Image (spheres, rainbow, N blue to C red):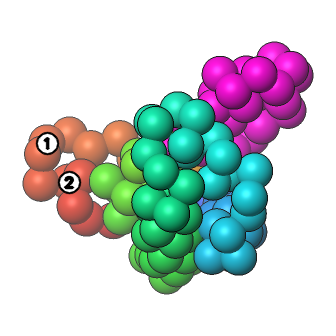
Amino acid sequence: MENLKKIEWVLRIAVTGEFVGHGIFALQGKQTWINWIHQLTGAEIGTAAVLLTIVGLLDLLFALIILARPIRIVVLWVTFWGFWTALVRPMVGEPIWDFVERWANWGAPLALLLIIGWPKNWREWFSR
C-alpha cells in the first residue's frame, strides 16, 4: 500500500509537470499551436490565439487540481486532453512518431485514474 501511494505521487507530479508545461507554452502564445488551431478549426489567427490562452489557463488550473487533490473527472479530462494533443500532431502533418512519443501524455493520467480508482457511480467522478 505504501508503494501505491508513492506511485500515485509520482504520477501526480508527472501529470502536473506536463500540464504546467503545456499551460505555459499556451500562455506564451506558441505560434505553432495557434497555427494548428487555425488549421483544424478554421478560426481566425486572433481567435485561435484567444482560444490557446483559455486552454493555457485551464491547463494550469487542472495541473494544480491534480497536484492538490486529483478529482476523477479532472483526471479523466487530462487523459482525454493528453491523447487529443498527441493525436493532433499527425492530423496537422507531423510524423506519426510525434503522436507515439506523447503516449505518456495520456498514459500517465490514465494510470493515475486507475490508481485512485475508477468511479462506481456518477457522483464519484466529482470526488477523490
Secondary element at image label 1: loop
Tell whether label 2 touches label 1 (CB within 8 Å): yes
Tell me if residue 89 is in the magenta stretch: yes
Query: Which of 35/44 is in front?
Result: 44
Please tell me in which quadrant of the rendered image residue 103 appears: top right
Tell me if residue 72 is in the magenta stretch: no
**Mark 2 sits on what residue?**
124
Q: Mark on residue 82?
A: none
Q: Residues within 10 Å of mark 2 (few under 14, many from 20)?
A: some
Q: What residue sits 12% from the left and 45% below the top?
A: 122
Residue 19 lies left or right of residue 32; in this view the side is: left
Name the residue type under label 2: Glu
> In this orientation, does residue 29 appear?
yes
Q: Name the spot of residue 64 as percent of width and height, x first.
A: 52, 79
Secondary element at image label 2: helix
Name the residue type under label 1: Asn
Q: What residue sits 58% from the left and 34% below the top?
A: 39
Residue 95 lies left or right of residue 39; in this view the side is: right
Exactly how many numbered labels are in the figure?
Answer: 2
Q: Mark on residue 121?
A: 1
Q: Name the spot of residue 20 as percent of width and height, x first.
A: 67, 73
Q: Name the spot of residue 120 as percent of width and height, x first.
A: 20, 40
Quote the CA–CA distance across marks 1 and 2: 6 Å
Query: Which of 105/45 is in front?
Result: 45
Query: Which of 43/36 is in front?
Result: 43
Q: Is residue 84 above or below residue 9?
A: above
State the quadrant of the N terminus: bottom right
Q: Which residues are magenta?
A: 81-105
Q: What residue sits 63% from the left and 54% below the top?
A: 34
State the quadrant of the C terminus: bottom left
